[in-house]
Amino acid sequence: MILYPYQKRWLNDESRFKVGMFARQTGKTFTTTLEIVLDCMQAELGGKKARWVILSRGERQAKEAINEGVKRHLEALGIACQIMEVPFSPTINALEVILPNGSKITALPANPDTARGFSANVFLDEFAFHADSREIWKALFPVISAGWKLRVVSTPNGKGNKFYELMTDDNPQWSKHTVDIYQALADGLPRQIDELKQGLNDSDAWQQEFELEWLDEASAWLSYELIDSVEHIDAGKPELYSGNPCYVGVDIGARNDLFVIWVIEEVGDVYWTRELITRRRISFAEQDDLLDDVFNRYRVIRCCIDKTGMGEKPVEDAQKRYGSTRVEGVMFTLSSKLAMATIGKQAFEDRKIRIPQGDGELREDLHKLKKQSSATGAPRFVAESDSSGHADRTWACFFGIECR
C-alpha cells in the first residue's frame, strides 16, 4: 500500500477536527477510510469498540467508500469482517462493516436525518457536494459533541456551501489541509497534467477540481451546458450564407480589448452565427474596413455598435455610411447591459441561436460573464480580463441579438 507524503500528512494528523481540500483522484477518500480502519483496529487491540459513520453525497458514493476503501484496507491487513446492507429508513439503506470485536463502520447517503441518527466519529466525504450542507451540519454537530472526531474532505464546489466556510474561516479548532494537483504531483503522484487538462477541455472545471479555485458556476450568466446546447458544426461559416436578412453586433475595442463583429443570419426563427471576426490592437480605419466588408457581403438589416467612450466616433461614421436607421449606437449602462444580457440569454435558453462548435476561446468568453449584485443590490455584469478578451465576443453576440 503506497501512501504519498500528502496522504501521510493527512493520515498522521490526529486533530479532533480536520478538514481537507484535495484535487480530484488524489486519494482523499482512500486515505480517510484507511484512517478509519486503523482507528478501529487500535480500539480493538485495546479491548474497546470504535464507531464511525461515513456520510457520502449519494448511495453510490457510500457503497464505494465501503467497497473501494474500508473493505480493501481490511483485506490488505488480513482482517476478517462482515458487510451488511441494513435499512436505515423506508427509503434509505446503509452499509455496515462489523469488525471481529464489535467495532462498526456505517456508510450511507448524507441528509439532515441521516446526520442526526448516530453518536459516532463522522467522515463527511465530498462535503461540498452534499445537498443541504448547512442543514446537515446543524444536525450533525451535536452528534459528535461528546468527544467524537470529525473528518471532512472534498474538492471545491463554488462558494455557496458549508465546506467553503470551513476552509476559509479563521477557526483555530480546525486543522486544514490543501492539496492541489501540483502538490500531489510534487509528492510523487503519477499524473500527466497536460494530458488531463487537454482531455478535460474545460478551464473552469480544471481550475475548480484540480487547482482548487473557488469558482461559482451559479454566477455565470451562460452556463457551459447552455453554451454547449446551441453549438453547431455549420455555424460560423460565411460560405453557408443563404442570403437571408442579417443582424450585426459590434463591440468596439482598442489597446487590450478585442474588436469583435458578430454576424447573425435569420433563418426561419433561428439566429445562425454566419461569421465571427475578432481583432486586437487595430486602427479605427481598419475597424471601418472590416465593417464595410461585412455590409458588402451580407444583407444587413440592422447593426448595433457599442458607442460607450471611444465608440462614439465609429458609430457616427458608420451611420454616415449606412444611415441611422440601419446603424444604432448603444451606450453601456447598468440598465442596457441587463436588458441585452436578458434578451441574449433567452435566445440561448430557447435554442434560438447557433454558435460555432469546438471554439474553445468563444466558449470561455461566453462563460466569462458573471452577474453580481452591487453594494446597492442592483445587478451588474462583470468579466475578468485576460489574454482572450473581456467577454467582448459575448457582448457583440448580445448586440446582434438586440438588433433583431
Image (spheres, grey):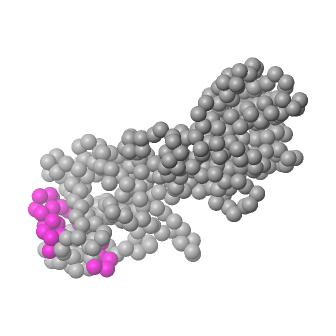
Q: Quadrant of residue 45?
A: top right
Question: Residue, x 46% and y 48% (percent of image)?
Answer: 206
- Is residue 47 or residue 174 the one in the foreground? 47
Say how many tags the image has. Answer: 0
Residue interval drawn in magenta: 285-310
Q: Residue furthest left?
A: 296
Residue 216 point in image, percent of width and height: 53, 56
- The N terminus - image quarter: top right
Question: Residue, x 42% and y 65% (percent of image)?
Answer: 384
- The C terminus - image quarter: bottom left
Question: Residue, x 66% and y 24% (percent of image)?
Answer: 76
Question: Residue, x 54% and y 56% (percent of image)?
Answer: 214
Q: Height in image: 201 above or below 370?
A: above
Relative to residue 281, is residue 204 drawn left or right?
right
Q: Specify whether residue 301 is painted magenta.
A: yes
- Is residue 271 or residue 168 the one in the foreground? 168
Q: Specify whether residue 256 is painted magenta.
A: no
- Is residue 112 or residue 197 the one in the foreground? 197
Relative to residue 69, is residue 238 drawn left or right?
left
Residue 357 point in image, percent of width and height: 29, 45
Residue 2 point in image, percent of width and height: 59, 33
Q: Quadrant of residue 44?
A: top right
